[in-house]
Image (cartoon, rainbow, N blue to C red):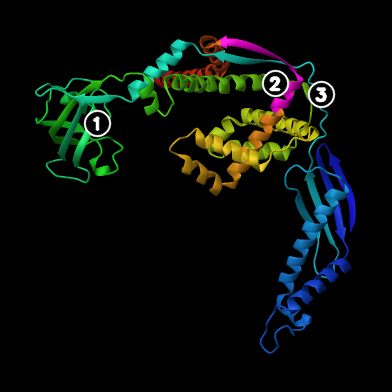
Amino acid sequence: MKIEVQSKKGLRTILSVIIDKKTIQNKMDERLNELQKEVSLKGFRSGKVPPSVIKNQFGKSIYGEVVDKILRETSAKAIAEKKIKIAGQPKINLKTFGEGKDLNYELEIDSLPDIKLESFEKYEATEYKTKIEEQIVSDKLQEISNQHKQFSDKKEGEVAKLGDQVIFDYSATVDGNKFEGSEGKGVQLELGKDLFLKGFDEQLVGVKKNDVKNLSAVLPANHPKKELANKNTKFACRILNVKKVQPNKIDDNFAKMMGAKDLNDLKKLIENQITSQYSQALNSITKKEILDQIEKNHKLDIPQNLIEQEILLMSQNLKEEEKKKNKENNEKIAKSRIKLGLILNEYGEKSNLKVTDDEVKAEIQKQIRGMPGQEKMVLEYYQKNPSASQSLKGSIYEEKIITLIKSKIKLKTKNINSKEAEKIISDFNKPNIEQTDIKKTKSSSKTNTKSKKISKK
């Protein structure tokens, strides 16, 4: 095998590879001998078909198979010999090939850039620790209590008011006809929430136990049966019971009903949950602060094929018009992502960071614990989607790198309350919101300008 560097421009290298015809013939002979043990042809005993007969019958197919194998083996060897760190899949361009000829091809390779890691000593970032006030925990506790309302029977003859619960059977018709789902038994509605049909609740205000109430409502536009969408429907309702809210007593018993040991334990769980939510948002701000400095302080070329792949991933669900409109911005984002990914990966490799299978399993278990009642669904998702586990592994790896970088830089800890946390998060998100508003305004201005031109005409 003969390997020559045909050209090298930036991160793209083109290698010329030549495999002499004798090597190819030897590979052909080896394959024919292997096939002799496998091929059965009429007129020959099994395993005794001459190689020449096999070649006459299947020559082109065998040659293609042999060449394909040679290309895979020799291209990998050529890359290894030239010590190229490839970025993406190399392209193979055949120049000369065919039985009795040398195999000559070009290998077009995009390589990863050499990365010189800059010192992190000058980097600075702020890490936030949020103290959750007792009032916020109390408000959340009351919110949980409101979400788990208890109802008790109203006195005989008492009418239903907004906020009461009405239990009823119904029979419905459209244009005098029954339809699928037109019967309901023991339906429970908390009046005022409008969870059944728009305007339905308010028509039940004033009913009492054992009443029969006739009312009408419009079926939704997204009704499963298209012929029933937006249809005016008449309901005959028999009121089974009317109940009023029985306020929860927020004590140890209520806490146990919510799955906590006692009230103090429930308060602690609520505080931890709120703290965790703030931490996620604030950690993202700290991470962005660090990543911006990493990107700013490192200069490197980025392989064009990786940029193209990233843009393809980013815009795969966009229409062609949107792709063109956002092309420049998408390319900028793609370059930033790849650059940071390469730098972080280099830092991870230099620091010999690894992610074990046990760490991935532990993270999956953490997600399962955070989604009570959906444990099976989460577990099945990762079992059926190996790419999801791989993506999770990548996230864990990145967090390990960020954690290590934090230990090397000047990291200032700032203790804040929830109001300060809200402002920091709001200020961080504001540029994105403003940018969206600017785009909308520009779009609106263009529309108005067009309208004026039309009206003038």
Residue assigned mark 3? 118
Counting other residues with Cα less than 10 Å from the Cα at mark 1, is it few (<14), some (14-19), or many (20 or more)?
few
Counting other residues with Cα less than 10 Å from the Cα at mark 2, is it few (<14), some (14-19), or many (20 or more)?
many
Residue at horizontal 83%, vertical 44%? Answer: 84
Residue at horizontal 79%, vertical 47%? Answer: 108
- Where does the magenta region start and end? 402-416
* Nearest the eye: 105 or 446: 105
Instruction: Assess whether residue 410 is covered by the magenta stretch.
Output: yes
Any part of residue 46 in sight: yes
Q: Quadrant of the N terminus?
A: bottom right
**Residue 105 position in % (x across, y down):** 82, 56
Q: Is residue 279 above or below residue 395?
A: above
In this picture, residue 238 sits left or right of residue 325 = left
Counting other residues with Cα less than 10 Å from the Cα at mark 3, is it few (<14), some (14-19), or many (20 or more)?
few
Residue assigned mark 1? 197
Secondary structure, mark 1, is: loop
**Residue 293 position in % (x across, y down):** 72, 20
Image quarter for residue 425?
top right
* Nearest the eye: 275 or 292: 275
> Disc 2 vs disc 1: Cβ atoms closer than 8 Å?
no
Type of amino acid at the residue the image marks with label 1: Leu
> Disc 3 vs disc 1: Cβ atoms closer than 8 Å?
no
**Residue 106 position in % (x across, y down):** 81, 52
Q: Quadrant of the C terminus?
A: top left
Spatial separation of the CA atoms under disc 3 and disc 1: 62 Å
In this picture, residue 278 sits left or right of residue 69 = left
Instruction: Assess whether residue 22 is covered by the magenta stretch.
Output: no
In this picture, residue 336 sits left or right of residue 11 = left
Secondary structure, mark 3, is: loop
